[in-house]
Structure formats: structure tokens, C-alpha cells
Image (cartoon, rainbow, N blue to C red):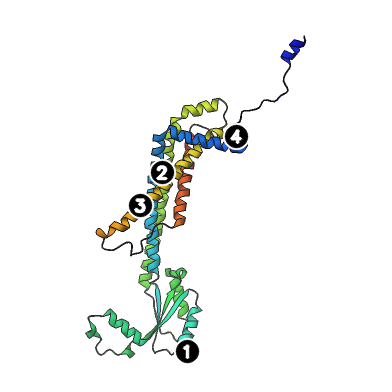
Amino acid sequence: MNRWKKKHTTSTTPFKRPTLAGDGFRGKIAYFVSRALTNIRQNVFVNVVTIGTIMLALLIVSLFLLVFVNLENAAESWSERVQVTVYFDKELTTPEQSVYRDKIYAVSGTAHVSYVSRTEAMKRFKERLRGQETLLEGVRVEVLPSSLEISLKRSSRETEAVNEYVTKLKRIPGISEIQYGEEWVRRFNAFLNFMRLLGGLLGGFLIIAVVFIVSNTIKLTIYARRDELEVMSLVGATRLFIKVPFLLEGILQGCAGSVLAVALLYGLYEGFLHNAGSFLTFNPASSGLAFLPIEYCAGLLVAGTLLGFIGSLTSLKRYINT
């Protein structure tokens, strides 16, 4: 009787689940990372294709960014030519120059004011007509007006801002004439707006294309292991437990692809700088052609990582319901 009781008595010791690589959160992280690396080693070809696709997609985006950044830099340099010139009928004395400078600096949007005397204006005129000095015979210095050349701040170089600025200048007494190249300013700002619109459209199209390509490429990885996913689900593994290694794999793929894209872009940039002189009429190194700023490179790395994560996440939905 006692033997029967011992045999059928229920044990009060709770069942202890086996741990992973270690106890707690760290053990799970170690398991997920090792599982992701194992998946990469077991499917080298598919992972190489995925990383290569991400690299090429990000390389296209980075090339566009490189062109766009340099166009923006060029546009910023050109915008410095937006200049307002105030003409006077007489030569200004030093006190008068100070008075007008103070009044012009008081107008919001003023960056720099420089005085051009009649003598300096004649000197510039002769330099522009170098080789045709006979045209200036008989032209006296008194014929030319003196002027104040005004450089504007970046925020005041748009068409509407320039018009508003000139309107404020006209209210200053003693100014006889104002010129600022209205047609040139309008065309320049139209060009800038067109470039920004084109950049936004092309950038949006490239982002959509990259997400589509990466998502469908990563599906190859998930499809190759569909049986494994089904088995893990049948034996009781949670959805998160199944997904995490594949999400980490996508993150690693995206990070590797973005690093390779930035490295390849830099190699192309350096190669272009050193060899462009043989087929271009200008030297790009001396013309100010710059590589992507560090924040853009960091953004590409983050974008590649997110692409890998999003691509894996969307691909997993086909086999694991959220």
C-alpha cells in the first residue's frame, strides 16, 4: 500500500523550462544573434544576393544625393551673386557713407554693405572693356555714379524677399536709383525650386523602389526556410521567438549593404576626382566638388539598417501572421 502511494503521489517540485545560451534576457539575445549568424552561414548565396541588392539600391540613392548636395552647394555659391546696388548722383563723404550704411544695415536681410566711389567704378568699367579702351575716350569720372553694393542674407535671396527688401530701401531718402537684376533673381529662384522639386520626386521614387526590391529579395531568404518556420510554430515557439533571428538577419544584411554602398561611392568619388581631368574641360577637385557630409553617410547607414529590418518584417508576414 505504501509502495503504491509512493508510486502515484504527485510531485510538488515545479517543472523548470530549459534555458537558452544563458539565463534571462542576455541568454535570449545571445541565442538570437547566434541563430541569425547561423542562418547567414547556411544560406550564403541568398544573403550575398540580398546584401548586393541593398548595396546597389543604396548606391543609386547615394549617387543621387552626391549630385544633389553638390548642386545645392553650387546654388548656394551662385545665390551670393544676388546683390542690390544703390546709386547716388554725387560722391558721398565719409560721414554720409556712415549714415547710409547704418540705415541700410537697419533693414532686415542686409548681410554686407560696401561703398564704390566714382573712381572705383571707372576702374571696374575699364577692366570689363579691356582691349576696347578706345570706347572710354572722353568719358569723365564725374559721369559715373557712386554706389553702395549690398549683399543679402540667405533668407532674403528669394524673389519675394528681394522685392520686399527693395521696397524698404526705397523709403530711405536720398537714394536715387536701385538695381538688383530682377529677371536674373527670378530665373535663379525658379531654377532652385525646379531642382528641389525634381530632387523630391526622384528621391521619393527611389525610396519606394528600394523598399520594394529589398522586400522581395529578402523573401527569398524566408521562402528557403518556410518549412523550418512551420515546424517551429507547430512545436510551440512564439511568433516573436521565430521572428527575432530573421529580423536581426535583415538588420545585419542592411547594415552590411549600406557600408559597402558608402565605401563603393567613396571609391567612385576618388576615382572620378583623379581621372576626370582627362575627359572634362575643368578640374572637379578645384571646382569644389565635395563628398557626402558625415550626416548623410550616417543617414545612409541608418537607412540601410531600416531597409533590412522592414524588408524582413514585411516578408515574414506571409508565413507568420502578426
Query: Of callouts 2 and 3, which one flags the residue occurring earlier in the amino acid sequence?
Result: 2
**Which amino acid does the dot numbered 2 rest on?**
Ile
Q: In the image, which is nearer the foreground, mark 3 or mark 4? A: 4
From the image, which quarter does the C terminus lie in? top right
Query: Of callouts 3 and 1, which one flags the residue occurring earlier in the amino acid sequence?
Result: 1
Q: Residue furthest top?
A: 1
Q: Residue furthest right?
A: 2
Q: Is residue 94 visible?
A: yes
Q: Is residue 4 left or right of residue 267?
A: right
Do the CB atoms of the residues marked 3 and 4 lie less than 8 Å apart?
no
Q: Which residue is mark 3?
A: 267
Residue depicted at x 44% and y 53%: 297
Q: Secondary structure at mark 3?
A: helix
92 or 174: which is nearer to us? 92
Place of residue 125 in the rendered image (x, y in percent of width and height, measured from the top left) = 30, 82
**Which amino acid does the dot numbered 1 rest on?**
Pro
| Alpha carbons under labels 3 and 1: distance apart | 57 Å
